[in-house]
Image (cartoon, rainbow, N blue to C red):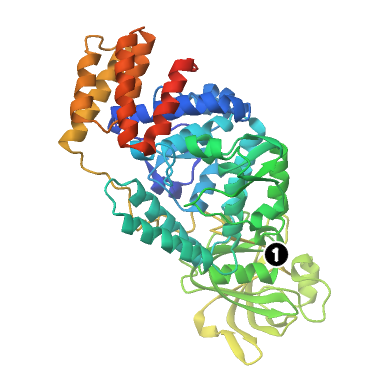
Amino acid sequence: MSLKIQSNEILDRLPKHLSQYIKPQDYDAYSAIDQAVWRYVMRKNVDYLSKVAHSSYLEGLEKTGISIDHIPNMYGMNRILKEIGWAAVAVDGFIPPSAFMEFQAYNVLVIASDIRQLEHIEYTPAPDIIHEGAGHAPIIANPEYAEYLRRFGEIGCKAISSAKDYELYEAVRHLSIIKEAPGTPKEEIDKAEANIEYLQQNMGEPSEMALIRNLHWWTVEYGLIGEVDDPKIYGAGLLSSIGESEWCMTDQVKKIPYTKEATFTGFDITKPQPQLFVTPDFAHLSLILEEFANTMALRKGGLSGVQKLIDSNALGTVELSTGLQISGVFSEAIDWEGKPIYIQTTGKTALSNREKELVGHSTKSHTNGYGTTVGKLKGINLAIEDMSPRDLEAYGIYEGKQVHLIFEGGIEVKGEIITGTRNLQGKIILISFKNCTVNHNDKVLFKPEWGIYDMAVGKEVVSVFSGSADLSSFNLVTHSPSSTTIKPKKSAERKALEMLYEQVRDFREGTNRTISRHKVFEQIVENHPEDWLLSVELFELASENGDTTFAEEIKQHLETVKQNRPEVGHLIDGGITLIQEQKVIR
């Protein structure tokens, strides 16, 4: 199979920088064991979830083209997903939360294309195709939920992060990788888990991204819906986990009505969740999301928003009341009476209006930082942005004029006006000076020898958010994960076992009926006595064919496996019970 990424009209809309996270799905790399793992989990889950999941789940499996018997092919999924306005891309494990949410904002599901090991068939901390494909994809067939997911991505990707957020992301990614890698020493896993616990306990004041990640966890990943006393499952983490989907419905897990308070409830990815939140319906999710969004710098702006951006030490945007947007890494804010009156960036900066970079104000024009006044002129009620051309002329703010502007809070701008830039509504948004000096008390903020001074016009900061206003202003292809998914080298024994799984799969699907299932079983008993899943599949075939003697022989062998490996006993029993009750949904 070609490793080319198949695109479509939805994927074509993605910003270029998101392509750095996308990888081709190598479908041929899935072994017959991987396919058996998918099939077992899906058969078990669908049987159980048909009773406890939201009705959209089973409907969504059909609508999104998710097969119970085969790992989804991304290209095939996309052909069906586009009918409901969505698409899917494959990635390598965890990606940064902001990127994950930005994909969602464009109606694109991010699917980790690896699949959990047989040893972790019930649950894995690593995102995998069972979690993403069988968990997230079916529910988006519900229009109300799909819009919530898109809107969540749209708002979430604007949330301001902290340096500690990224450190925690890297630690979680590292743990997920080593836990899924065969042969990782227990001490290494314990060390990684202890590191995550330490980071979680020492995050300090939670950032916007940390808070919105809590909402994402308690809804998209671990959400329940309906009545608190009789909820249904819709969260992908529960839908894709055999163990947790059953555990969450017991009285040992506290059920709480979903409110904005979930924002402040943290979670531990390494442990089962002690409580879950129940939303009455999908529309309520959007209500809580909007309540949270109203607390974000995205909507509140102001000094607190600017300070969040400074503390993040990351690329962000400040938007003024005129619509002028300043994108860069913010380093300083001078305040007066609780309002920012001067803001400063460091390094490359770009100026935009309505997410479109202003001509002549790219990072090439502002390479060493950018500073500007914010606010109204002292003693004048009319803000500069609200002045008509005649007002501007009356106050001496006119091309070729030498001016001395004194702003509230004490910022002074002295220089000769070159020109002004207006937006489509006619408001002046930028005034350029030459021979300009900018001061605040005794502090010099701009000197004439530094060149042209471009003063942004705006009486207040109305919005502050993560990232660049115009996505083309900066080189955003910068993601370099500290660790990548480990692809172990297969032993001769493993290859032989995969061959047996493939023979049984071929027999069941009718592509090769000449295979002797008895000989396969003999090889399992002799060479792979600890494997249990292939014997369960052989038991299924024997039961379907009415071969009770062979079925009983397999069952006796599985009893021996249970004695030698008690930790898989419930998995064997679950598979046998499902077959015997003939509750297979095809």
Residue lying furthest top in this view? 546
Side of 15 where 222 appears, left or right? right
Residue closer to the observer: 413 or 525: 525
Q: Residue 406: name its quadrant.
A: bottom right
Please count the marks in the image. 1
Q: Residue 461: name its quadrant.
A: bottom right
Is residue 374 at all visible to an observer of this figure?
Answer: yes
Q: Give residue 219's position: percent from left, percent from top.
A: 61, 44
Is residue 236 at all visible to an observer of this figure?
Answer: no
For the point 79% across and 67% down, which residue is it?
387
> Which quadrant does the N terminus fall into?
top left
Q: Give residue 112's position: percent from left, percent from top.
A: 41, 41
Residue lying furthest left in this view? 492
Q: Give residue 59's position: percent from left, percent from top.
A: 58, 23
Residue closer to the observer: 162 or 507: 507
Side of 459 where 29 appears, left or right? left
In this rendering, the answer to whether 405 lies above or below 575 is below
In this rendering, the answer to whether 522 lies above or below 460 is above
Side of 485 where 276 appears, left or right? right
In this rendering, the answer to whether 29 lies above or below 481 is above
Residue closer to the observer: 578 or 7: 578
Residue lying furthest bottom in this view? 442
Name the amino acid type tagged 1: Ile
Badge 1 marks a residue whose secondary structure is: strand
Q: Residues within 10 Å of mark 1 (few under 14, many from 20)?
A: many
Q: Give residue 146's position: percent from left, percent from top.
A: 61, 35
Write down the residue under mark 1: 428
Residue closer to the observer: 102 or 413: 102
